[in-house]
Image: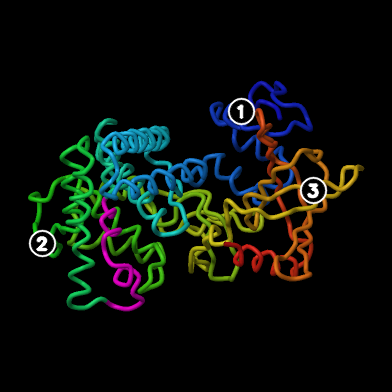
Amino acid sequence: MKHPATQQILLPAGTVLSESYIRKIQNMGLEEVALSCTKPPADRRLEALELSRGLPFEYALYLEGKRVIDDLHDCIRPHVLPEQREHVWSRALAYVGRLVDMLCARNLEQYVDYRVYDAYRHSHPVNTAILSILTAQAARIGRERLVEIGMAGLLADIGKARVPFQVINKPSRLEGEELKLARGHVEHSRAIVEMFRWAAGDVVHVAQHHHERYDGSGYPKGLAGRSIGEFARIVGLADAYDAMLSDVPYRQRMEPAVAYRLVTTSAAFDPQVVAAFKRRVSPYPRGMQVRLSNGKEGVVCRVAADNPFRPAVIVDADEVDLAQDQTLRITGQFVPRRYHRTSVMLPVRILGGGVMERQGLAINISLAGLCVESEQVPPQGEPLAVILPVLGSSQQVNLTGYLTWVRHGEGSERTAYGLSIVPTTPEDKTLLVDLILGLP
């Protein structure tokens, strides 16, 4: 890897991309140069590594968000001591602070897919916080207040934990008493947030009023216009937009263009908030995987601020500018994380490199790669035969893999490394999908 300006050698051939190298590359702004030097091509790399390069949301930060959300839900129980709640609140503040720092490092005109795609209970609070921070940043709100609005987005729907499970997860339209119970989550959210005595007043207000609407059509009080707090108006839009883009028990997710047009043209949302939202959020942001009208899939690589519905897309290593090519259009979004599992314990066999078979434990798996723990690290730069068992059957998945990163363990920790993977045959890809979907 050479510096594009000086041609100085920054990393010699055969270097494994450790986490420290990745951070240095990102700080220098040389992600694209690094990716052009790696094996295999960028779209075959381990998903976690691909995310860390800065296109979609950084997956490690999302995993921390899941833990924070679980801890916040644990604090709902009445026997939790105030000291425990204070500790969890401090952790949540620190997490949102890191979110703000990451998002503020981006240029306001650089559209990037920050949303995460996982279980709704965890992804929706994180996405609402992210979209709220982005909108508030575009509205020129200061950093300290950005942390507050991020916390408000993270906690807005925490009251759903007190709504009966059969109501929240009903696969059909809510009526009568069920609808009343579901809408009651805003009062539960307010009561829970007030249990954290360090919560700012705006965070409490958002918990209760993020479903109020600018035209007066919301609940619980039917407030309208500027009688709704600014943070509640921002979080309300972010919450609604992410809910539209998510699969929920009573309906499938909307396509991004449909949801985007709904929230940006509706009288239910403050026009000034909508304007800020449009400056920072795009229906098809850079990094989003999409499906085109010709049946092919691609990744959005460039978005024009004046034409967000027709971005440029990388398809089969070629760039297709939909603003210029009117014969093609985006017909849907492809969500890769539906084929992703973390915290698994799956035995893996690795052959290659002129040595005996290596055995390890896959702890993180997707269609693009594995995170493996083992005592031996395979060589980098040459193809490896990777074999996964299909649990509950005699079948196995045969893959070709490449080493992409290594994290050496400390003390009793085992060494972890990333393998990008490519199924050997179409049958192996089908088996891999079935394997991932069948994991707990």
Amino acid marked by disc 3 = Gln
Question: Mark number for residue 341?
Answer: none
Q: Is residue 168 depicted above or below 110 in this figure?
A: below
* C-alpha distance separating marks 1 and 2: 51 Å
- Judge by depth and name the residue closer to the eye, 18 or 33: 18
Question: Mark number for residue 359?
Answer: 3
Question: Mark number for residue 216?
Answer: 2
Amino acid marked by disc 2 = Gly
Label 2 environment density (alpha carbons within 10 Å; few <14, some 14–19, many ≥20)? some
Q: Do the numbered discs 1 and 2 sit on residues whose CB atoms are within 8 Å? A: no
Q: Is residue 102 depicted above or below 7 in this figure?
A: below
With 250 as the anchor, is 339 left or right in this view?
A: right
Q: Quadrant of residue 426?
A: bottom right
* C-alpha distance separating marks 2 and 3: 62 Å
Dot 1 or dot 2, earlier in sequence: 1
With 399 as the anchor, is 296 left or right in this view?
A: left
Amino acid marked by disc 1 = Ser
* C-alpha distance separating marks 1 and 3: 26 Å
SS label for mark 2: loop
SS label for mark 1: helix
The region drawn magenta spans 156-173
Dot 2 or dot 3, earlier in sequence: 2
